[in-house]
Image (tube, rainbow, N blue to C red):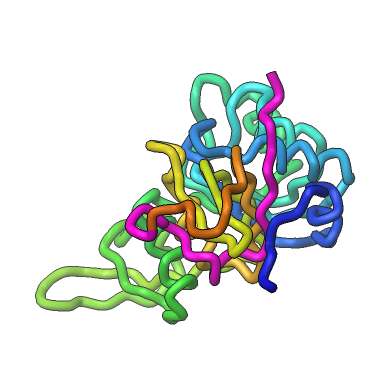
C-alpha cells in the first residue's frame, strides 16, 4: 500500500544532509513552508544552497534560516526588499553568496529541470552582466542567452490538502512556485494543512500529482 504521509516531520527532515541544494516554495511569505524551515533550523543542517523567489522577510521563515547561518548560497530573483535586513547584513559582510536570476528565468530554469530538458535559451538578461561568459544565439533576429536548468536534492513546499499518495491541491496564491519545484527535486517534502482520505480530492483540482512527492506532513501552523 502506498502511503507517503508521515506523522514525524523531524524524522523526514533528518534525511537531509549538510551541503544539500533545497528549493523552498513561496512568493514572499505566501506559500512558504515555515514549519518545515523551522525544522531545518532545529536540526542544525548547514552549508545549504537555497533556491527561492526572494531572500526572506523580516525574521520569519526563510529569513530565520539565513540568520541561523545554515545557508552558504541563495539563488533567487528578489534578494532585497524593505524587510530583507538579515540577507543584507549577511551579503554585505561576505557571509552568503548570491546568484541573481530574473524571475521568469528562475521559473523556466526550474521547469526545464522538472521536464528533463537541458539548457534553455532566453532573451532575458542578454547583453547584461547576468549573461557574461554564457553562450548566446541570434534566432529570427532576436538575441538569446543560454541558461542551465536548476534542480535540487530536496524541495520543501506548502500545499493546502494532500492524500496518502502525495497528490496535492493548493490555496490561491500559495500555489506559486510549489508545483514546478516539486518536479525539479529528487525528493519533495510537502507540508499540508490536512491529509484527506484517498479519493477525496477532485482529480480536476489536483495540481501536483503524487508521483512528484515523496513525503506529506500534516502541519498545524504556529499561532
Total label count? Answer: 0
Q: Is residue 154 left or right of residue 119?
A: right
**Which picture quadrant has residue 108?**
bottom left
Q: Is residue 124 left or right of residue 68?
A: left
- Residue at 75 percent across and 62 percent down: it is 20
Q: Which residues are magenta?
A: 203-223
Q: Quadrant of the N terminus?
A: bottom right
Residue 66 location, quadrant: top right
Q: Residue at x 63, y 24 (%)?
A: 85
Quarter holding the C terminus is: top right
Residue 36 in the image: x percent, y percent? 71, 43
Give 50 or 100, whichever is nearer the viewer.
50
**Is 68 located above or below residue 144 in the figure?**
above
Q: In the drawing, does residue 121 fall left or right of residue 24?
A: left
Let me know if residue 64 appears in the view.
Answer: yes
Q: From the top left corner, tell me how far across and down residue 52 is, in percent.
A: 55, 47
Taking the magenta stretch, the answer to whether it contains residue 209 is yes
Q: 114 and 18: which one is in front?
A: 114
Instruction: Please name the predominant secondary structure of the magenta segment in the image.
Output: loop
- Residue at 54% x, 71% y: name it: 211
- What residue sits 51% from the left and 67% below the top? 183
Which of the two residues, 129 or 52, is positioned nearer the viewer here?
A: 52
In the rendered image, the vertical position of residue 180 relative to residue 145, given as above or below: above
Specify the quadrant of the image occupied by residue 122: bottom left
Q: Is residue 157 magenta?
A: no
Relative height, residue 173 to residue 22 (above, below): above
User: Is residue 98 something that shows in the picture?
Assistant: no
Q: Position of residue 143 (x, y in %)?
A: 21, 69
Residue 58 drawn at (x, y percent) = 62, 22
Q: Residue furthest left?
A: 141
Amino acid at each position: 500500500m502506498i502511503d507517503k504521509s508521515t506523522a514525524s516531520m523531524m524524522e523526514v527532515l533528518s534525511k537531509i544532509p549538510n551541503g544539500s541544494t533545497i528549493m523552498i516554495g513561496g512568493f514572499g511569505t505566501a506559500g512558504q513552508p515555515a514549519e518545515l524551515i523551522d525544522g531545518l533550523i532545529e536540526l542544525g543542517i548547514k552549508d545549504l544552497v537555497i533556491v527561492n523567489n526572494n531572500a526572506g522577510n523580516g525574521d520569519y521563515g526563510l529569513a530565520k534560516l539565513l540568520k541561523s547561518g545554515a545557508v552558504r548560497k541563495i539563488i533567487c530573483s528578489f534578494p532585497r526588499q524593505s524587510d530583507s535586513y538579515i540577507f543584507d547584513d549577511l551579503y554585505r559582510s561576505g557571509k552568503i553568496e548570491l546568484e541573481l536570476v530574473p524571475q521568469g528565468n528562475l521559473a523556466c530554469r526550474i521547469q526545464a529541470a522538472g521536464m528533463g530538458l537541458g539548457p534553455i535559451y532566453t532573451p532575458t538578461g542578454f547583453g547584461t552582466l547576468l549573461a557574461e561568459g554564457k553562450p548566446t544565439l541570434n534566432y529570427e533576429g532576436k538575441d538569446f542567452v543560454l541558461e542551465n536548468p536548476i534542480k535540487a536534492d530536496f524541495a520543501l513546499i506548502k500545499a493546502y490538502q494532500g492524500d496518502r499518495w502525495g497528490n496535492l491541491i493548493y490555496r490561491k496564491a500559495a500555489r506559486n512556485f510549489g508545483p514546478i519545484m516539486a518536479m525539479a527535486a529528487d525528493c519533495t517534502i510537502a507540508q499540508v494543512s490536512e491529509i484527506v482520505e484517498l479519493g477525496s480530492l477532485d482529480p480536476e483540482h489536483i495540481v501536483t500529482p503524487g508521483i512528484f512527492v515523496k513525503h506529506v506532513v500534516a502541519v498545524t501552523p504556529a499561532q
